[in-house]
Image: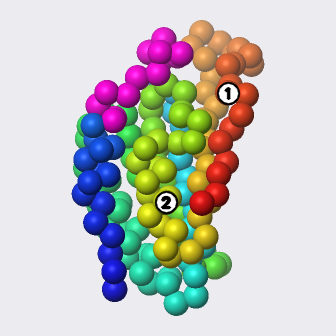
Amino acid sequence: MHLIDFTAFIYLAHCVLSKEVNPATGGNTLRWIETIRIQAAAGKETAAREQLTVLVHEIEELVRTGELESITASQNALVPEYFALRLFWNTGEPHRWGSTLGVNVAHSMKEFGLIDHSLWIEEREPEGGTDHERDVPEETAFCEY
């Protein structure tokens, strides 16, 4: 079985996370979720599951550095070849196509099957009351690799 070495882009993601600031938000943080869904090709389910396990352990190192809050991996309850990796961020507005880490993970998982990479913004009640007018990016990034 072939496992991908993610050392190089884990290091790159660490460098980006330690310096990445979005001036458009004035330093305000926003919780957003980057979801990478994998539909493993026939015969590649075990390899995809093993690769996700390796990724989760390697990326958990970044959680201690700051902006990446947590990472989860899951398998669909009804369809065993469907997997999801979720990166929970606490930064300014998300980048249009996702984080460097998320884009690299999605790209590298293509060898196992179809990929859906999407960004989700957590809805929060603003401090001091309910204000339903909130700056939301005009376009929400949904991209397939």
Q: Is residue 73 visible?
A: no
Report the front residue among 77 and 8.
Answer: 8
Q: Secondary structure at mark 1?
A: loop
User: In the picture provided, is 104 more to the left or to the right than 10?
Assistant: right
The answer to which image quadrant residue 115 occupies is bottom right
Q: Is residue 21 magenta?
A: yes
Q: Position of residue 68 (x, y in %)?
A: 38, 40
The C terminus: image quadrant? bottom right
Q: Position of residue 112 (x, y in %)?
A: 50, 76
Residue stretch rendered in magenta on the structure = 16-28
Q: Image height check: is 98 above or below 35? A: above
Q: Residue at x 27, y 37 (%)?
A: 15
The residue at which mark 2 appears reads as: 107
Q: Are marks 2 and 1 in contact (CB under 8 Å)?
A: no
Report the front residue among 62 and 123.
Answer: 62
Q: Position of residue 84 (x, y in %)?
A: 54, 63
The N terminus: image quadrant? bottom left
Q: Residue at x 31, y 27 (%)?
A: 19
Q: Secondary structure at mark 2?
A: helix
Going by the numbered disc 2, the residue's amino acid type is His
Going by the numbered disc 1, the residue's amino acid type is Pro
User: In the picture provided, is 117 more to the left or to the right than 15?
Assistant: right
Callout 1 crowding tier (Cα within 10 Å): few <14, some 14–19, many ≥20 = few
The number of discs equals 2
Q: Image height check: is 87 above or below 108? A: above
Q: Residue at x 68, y 25 (%)?
A: 136
Q: Is residue 58 magenta?
A: no
User: In the picture provided, is 33 more to the left or to the right than 27?
Assistant: right
Q: Residue at x 40, y 68 (%)?
A: 52
The residue at which mark 1 appears reads as: 137
Q: Position of residue 114 (x, y in %)?
A: 61, 70
